[in-house]
Amino acid sequence: MLKLPGLIDPHVHVREPGQTHKEDWDSVTQAALAGGVTMILAMPNTKPPIFDEATLNLALDAAKGKARCDYAQFLGAGPDNADWDRHKGLPLRAAGLKMYLDSTFGELRLDDMTLWMPHFEKFPKDFPIVLHSESRTMAAGILFAAIYDRPIHIAHVSLKEEILLIKAAKEKGIKVTCEVCPHHLFMVSQLTDEERGKKKEGRDEVRPRLATQEDVDALWQNMDVIDCFATDHAPHTLEEKDSENPPPGFPGLETLLPLLLTAVSEKRLNIEDIIQKSVTNPRKIFNIPEQPETWIEVDESAEYEIKAENQFTRCGWTPFEGWTVKGKVMKVVLRGKTAFEDGKVLAEQGYGRNVRQSCKTSPM
Ligand code: NCD
Ligand code: ZN
């Protein structure tokens, strides 16, 4: 039995408020615990999106009643909410600021670079801005980090050109960190260059899209440039994924660690990489307190098949269905209490703590 610290997933779509038929604070935190994840950072592209005091309270109230693992909630950058200097209490209550610079699922999007500027100027510099920015948009985001001299964290890096540029930016001393998702490390796009971006295969739809073997190889070759593993757990129901207009996104909380441990058993990764990228680095980057008396126990030699029917996520499917993996989460202890054991979630609703709670100050 291998003992590891509880994992932190810095990129999770909870779907509450607004789309609880896909997932909610209860089901998502059950999925997290089953995956060995004891803390999630929740993305703001809910319905309504989380972008001000009222909507932040909406998400945090739901979380307070239902979450079974620890958490923090991101604020979203919109066209009209960049006056963070006048609402100082808000950033302190959030995981950070998420900026959507490319199109994806949800309403938050900033097309015009003049809309990026006030957020870069005014969001407190001790909390990172997380960018959804692909390819050349990512290069623009890095230029902004350099100009405004503030930390940014690039979400879900998937391309060779992206990881190479981040490497070069780090060498120049620009304050950039990044995360990579398991699906971009373990899956290769089956589409040709011509088909990519045109063809709609619901269950393959994800943003950023699955990339080529060359891109996947570049991520593995530059493992030292990757700061964090993040699932980008983005649950949509099977019915939605198989519909005419499938929304992009994969669930991932329950498959993250088994996939990484399988890579360890194949000697493509080591345990230290997992601890660094799923615990130490996210804690540092997002300014997260340590979770005392928190650990997970995994059976490194347990081999089994991934099956959606064994998962806690409400979405009812996984892109890794039928994959054989080696490494199983047996037990999770969160702040001294057994939260998951023998396939059962034991932590109750409301046991999860908002890790930004101690920062609570009155807004304005
Ligand atoms: C995400 C979602 O469904 O909320 N989808 C995805 O494909 N990753 C949005 C996002 O993170 O871009
Ligand atoms: Zn996402």
Image: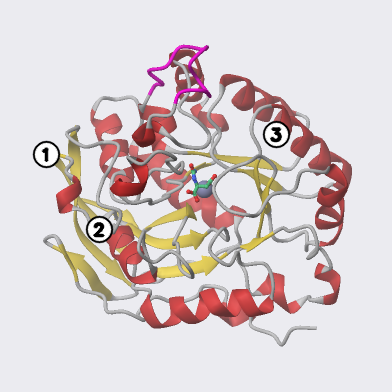
Most common SS among magenta residues: loop
| Residue 122, numbered label | none
What stretch of residues is rendered in magenta?
188-199
Q: Is residue 196 above or below residue 120?
A: above
Which quadrant would the C terminus be assigned to in this image? bottom right
What's the residue at 73%, 58% (across, down)? Answer: 78
Mark 2 or mark 3: whose residue is earlier in sequence: 2
For marks 3 and 1, give the one nearer the viewer: 3
Distance in Å between CA atoms under marks 2 and 3: 33 Å
Out of 76 and 186, give the one closest to the viewer: 76
The one nearer the camera, 174 or 199, is 199
Query: Which residue position holds label 1?
Result: 304
Task: Please tell me which residue is depicted at 86% across the width and 56% down the height of the picture.
Answer: 118
Estimate how packed mark 3 is, as few (under 14), some (14 to 19) or many (20 or more) residues with alpha carbons within 10 Å.
many
The residue that appears at 73% across and 78% down in the rendered structure is 89
Q: Is residue 152 above or below residue 323?
A: below
Measure the alpha-carbon separation of dots 1 and 2.
Answer: 15 Å
Residue receiving disc 2: 34
Q: Label 1: few (<14), some or many (≥20) within 10 Å?
A: some
For the image, the number of numbered tags is 3
Front-most of 63 and 286? 63
Residue 190 left/right relative to 179: left
Quarter of the rendering containing residue 271: top left
Q: CA distance from mark 3 to mark 1?
A: 38 Å
Q: Upstream in the sequence, badge 1 or badge 2? A: 2
Q: Which residue is mark 3?
A: 138
